[in-house]
Amino acid sequence: MTAEWLECIACHAQFASTEVRYTCDCGALLSLERPAGFAAKLATRTFDARLASRDDVDRSGVWRFREAVLDVPTSAIVSHPEGATRLYRRPSLSAYAGVEPLAFKHEGENPTGSFKDRGMTVAVTQAVRLGERAVACASTGNTSSSLAAYAAQAGTRAIVFVPAGKISLGKLAQTLAYGALCLNVRGDFDAAMRLVNKACAKLDIYLLNSINPFRIEGQKTIVWELLQDRGWRAPDWIALPAGNLGNTSAFGKALREALEGGWIDRVPRIAAIQASGANPFSRGFAEDFRTRHRMKAETIASAIRIGDPVSWDKARAAIAETHGVVGEVTDAELLEAKRAIDEAGIGCEPASACSLAGVRKLRAAGTIRPSDDVVCVLTGHVLKDPDVVLHAPGIDRSSQTIEIDPTVAAVEAALANRL
Ligand code: F0G
């Protein structure tokens, strides 16, 4: 087992991993760190051998990599189990993006339907280890669903702060179903985020947003598992949607550690894609990150309707270290890409489709080449936001849903010219 500590990403001050804190005294974010060379002591064949195991901890796509995730006894782990998601390839989507080979890692296949479960299993395990009685987050709906599910499993009180009337019905229902207390904040996600920060500090509640470094440790495994799925052969690009920037940060750390460990021999470039109505990070990238932008966010992709992302500095480092890019796509572009993914029989929620829409645009701009090897991460399940499937602008399902009398003649009439 390796020793672990929390370390400031700016001034490198160190704190015990059992201390409850999310930022350094200097104000910068904290990262969970281990002794130099730790990753090189871990062999990918150990991770590969666990694929054949019947043990839940080995089968979890997070805890399969446990030596590089969190140093706790396996008996202390709160796991559903999560991860072990699939990679999809579809000729129609390669043609749509203009890129081949192209694959999709579908994180919507996690237990609560989004990638958040990978971070939550680690952060809730840490909450239990610290003896926390209540956990909280601000959320656009996926983090809250995941927190609620894992808190229910751990027997911890779950309190979620969501922008009132601004999260999808599926996510709200799911969060309530698992038993969380839902505070509908009159304001946007950024207001809910500021509020939960202050409330947790004052009321001694453990904060489970991705500002919590233990969330990032779990989300690293999206990248490790996709590398493992590919026999530890790095792609040229990994594309993902970007909102609060926790996942972009986690991908950067995962790639740094995989390279240090010799698990891969080169680093893929990260393409972080925002919605153009919620694009502070993309604006920052366009001007070499001279300014930390903050904005009032608006997009149909409610999951990433975020104007003041908390993990900015970590994500900026991830883009720099991987020679990555930050792109943006309009609502029309992400909806069109979502439709292509849905009609390929895969399906995803609107924010997830930013990855494909972004790759198509980067290909058209010549940043991505036609023969580049690309993996898009789909972050959430199609059922997370049924309203967009049925009622988004430009969507007309009337020719697809026909009410009929219960007669064969009515079926025949409905199927005329359609068989
Ligand atoms: N995709 C989906 C489906 C999400 O739910 C989120 C974030 C992202 C992408 C962006 O990831 O924030 O790490 O950059 N959802 C958060 C939530 C904000 O509350 O569920 P990020």
Image (tube, helix red, strand yellow):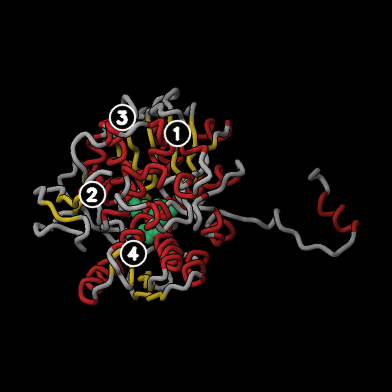
Marked residue nearer the N-terminal end (1 or 3): 1
User: Measuring 41% from the left and 36% from the top, which residue is drawn there?
Assistant: 47
The amino acid pointed to by label 3 is Val
Q: Which residue is mark 4?
A: 128
Q: Which residue is mark 2?
A: 32
Q: Which residue is mark 3?
A: 267
Crowding around mark 1 (Cα neighbors within 10 Å: few <14, some 14 to 19, many 20+) is: some
Cβ at disc 4 under 8 Å from ligand 1 = no
Quote the CA–CA distance across marks 2 and 1.
24 Å
In the image shown, does 272 or 128 lie closer to the viewer? Answer: 128
Marked residue nearer the N-terminal end (2 or 1): 2
Marked residue nearer the N-terminal end (4 or 2): 2
User: Is the Cβ of the residue at disc 4 closer than 8 Å to that at disc 2?
Assistant: no
In the image shown, does 48 or 231 lie closer to the viewer? Answer: 48
The amino acid pointed to by label 1 is Asp
Task: Note whether 229 is above or below 165 in the view shown.
Answer: above
Front of the two marks 3 and 2:
2
Of the four image quadrants, the one with ligand 1 is bottom left
Task: Note whether 77 is above or below 266 in the view shown.
Answer: below
Front of the two marks 3 and 4:
4
What secondary structure is marked by label 1?
Answer: helix
The amino acid pointed to by label 2 is Leu
The amino acid pointed to by label 4 is Val
Q: Which residue is mark 1?
A: 48
